[in-house]
Image (cartoon, rainbow, N blue to C red):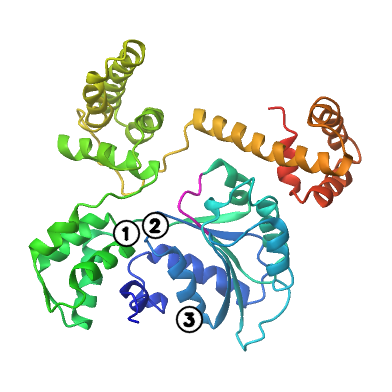
Amino acid sequence: MSIPWVEKYRPRSLKDVVDQEEAKAKLEEVVGRWLKGEQLRKGVLLAGPPGVGKTTLIHALANDYGLEVLELNASDERTGDRISRIVGRSIRESSLFGFRGKLILFDEVDGLDLKEDRGGVGEIIKVIGESRFPVVLTANDPWDPKLRDLRERCEVIQLKPLKESDVVKLLRKICDAEKIRCSDDALRLLAKASMGDARAAINDLELVARGRSAVTEEDAEAISYRAHQVDMFRVVDMAIKARNFEEARRVTSLPSFDWESFFTWITESVPVAYGSAPMALFDAMNNLSRADLIRGRIERLQEWELMRYMLELMTAGAALVREKPKLPFFIKYGYPAKIRLLNKIRAMRQVREVLIRKLREEAHLGSRVINLEVLPMLRLLIRGERGSSVLAELSRVTGLGEEEIRLALSTD
């Protein structure tokens, strides 16, 4: 069976990783400090969209420095108990296979589910604090509210989408190795369609080129319009940085586009992007206020034929403004306050359900009694002098982390 090209041409050394020079330097600096005997107090959180090389960077780093990678990824069960069983002893013991040391990798931590992976966040925090070895995490969306406690214990390193020219060079290198003739225009089409995702670009190239000796521009064009699943940070960034009407309007055709969420995001992101340009900010917010008026009319009168005008004002109206400033490659958009609050409430409810179920099993009491009598008592106890011991005992009984118990008992 032939090896997929994305694996066959995966970089084995940091020098082969395209771009990401800042991230490579920071990772080498962290490993260098550890090799000199420094006890690392923080983990490293690699953040960035899919396909930019987060996991590849860690394996390349390990190869260069002779380190063993101990990895838990998104397909694994990552409850506190399982993490403790798999990683617990390994973070204190030397490698059995002759490596200089280890890298502990928790891949795609934003995929942790507070309900299914109960205790997982707390156990990862414990690993970071107790590990003899560097601990690295990766996430597509590092600003997810459920990762707040992890972020505070990590140095966040942001990886950026690859430049179109870098993706073209990467694809050209593969074509040369596979002895496939491919025009520069065809490679540019594939690179543009990937939107900085090297994995997507390589998969697309393999799709059109495997078993053939040449790839034409027409071949690449057939799959160059791809329906990407991208996070809302990326959708907002694409809309704000659009250079013309069609480019701005195109984000509404993405499968991950949700106009209700997008409106909340774009309203809070425009001031971040245009904060230094009053005229651009005025135009964008004025257009968004008009979009909001149309939205209200649609919801009130069910006049859905107005949807196209609302979407145009939300997207092109935010991008095509007077005195638009030159925007940096990376803009640090924040999670909207409304969504942060809703996420916190949802996470609190999920963890509280788990806590109530565990207490019901242990104490043989009904949910109503636990809600009305037990939880209020526990809130008082954890604020008292023996609060830390109460939390530790609750954690032992329920299998939840102490931070998760605090969240479950929160009234904020």
Q: Earlier in the sequence, mark 2 or mark 1?
A: 2
Mark 2 sits on what residue? 50
Cα separation, mark 2 vs mark 3, equals 23 Å
- Write the residue at 16% across / 37% down: 246
Question: Is 148 located above or below residue 220 in the figure?
Answer: above
Whether the magenta-drawn stretch holds residue 3 is answered as no
Residue 146 drawn at (x, y percent): 59, 44
Cα separation, mark 2 vs mark 1, equals 6 Å
Number of residues whose C-alpha sits closer than 10 Å to that of mark 3, classed few (under 14), some (14–19) or many (20 or more): some
Number of residues whose C-alpha sits closer than 10 Å to that of mark 1, classed few (under 14), some (14–19) or many (20 or more): many
Q: Earlier in the sequence, mark 3 or mark 1?
A: 3
Tag 3, which secondary structure? helix
Of marks 3 and 1, the one in the foreground = 1
Mark 1 sits on what residue? 197
Q: Is residue 153 left or right of residue 184?
A: right
> Visible in this render: residue 243?
no
Question: Is 70 located above or below residue 267 in the figure?
Answer: below
Residue, far bottom: 98
Of marks 2 and 3, the one in the foreground = 2
| Span colored in magenta | 138-143
- Three-letter residue code for mark 3: Asp
Mark identifier at residue 64: 3
Residue 256 drawn at (x, y percent): 35, 42
- Which of these two is toward me, 188 or 216? 216
Q: Are marks 3 and 1 in contact (CB under 8 Å)?
A: no
Cα separation, mark 3 vs mark 1, equals 24 Å
